[in-house]
Amino acid sequence: MNPHDYITTAQAAEMLGVTRQRFHDFVKEGRIKCVRFGHTRIILKDDVKNFKKIKRGPGLRLTAARK
């Protein structure tokens, strides 16, 4: 485990262009995994990159659809 492979939720949110709260929603929804390291949640940087590459149809955004 290389520490440079992991980023914080704040860094992940910035990479995705969403708020930290929205990123935490993704985690709660099971759309992306994170690991607790003490009081901090860390995420594999590659997981965030892959999440960002998810193909979306026209009009779909990174945020979840409203029900």
Image: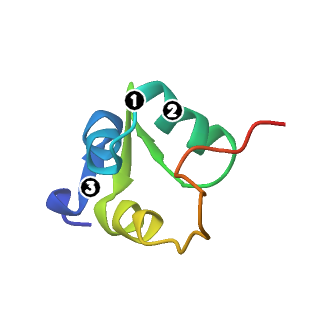
Along the line of sight, which residue is nearer the eye, 55 or 21? 55
Residue carrying label 1: 19
Amino acid identity at mark 2: Arg
* Residue 18 drawn at (x, y percent): 39, 37
Residue carrying label 3: 6
Which picture quadrant has residue 60?
Answer: bottom right
Label 2 or label 3, whichever lies nearer to me, is: 2
The numbered disc on residue 22 is 2
Along the line of sight, which residue is nearer the eye, 32 or 66? 66
CA gap, disc 1 and disc 2 = 5 Å
Image color mode: rainbow
* Residue 2 drawn at (x, y percent): 19, 65
CA gap, disc 2 and disc 3 = 19 Å
Horizontal relation, residue 49 to residue 27: left or right: left
Which picture quadrant has residue 10?
Answer: top left
CA gap, disc 1 and disc 3 = 18 Å
Q: Quadrant of the C terminus?
A: top right
* Residue 61 drawn at (x, y percent): 54, 52
Tell me the residue at 57%/44% (across/down). 63
- In this rendering, the answer to whether 62 lies above or below 66 is below
Mark 2, Cα crowd under 10 Å, few <14 / some 14-19 / many 20+, is: some
Amino acid identity at mark 1: Thr
Cβ–Cβ under 8 Å for marks 1 and 2: yes
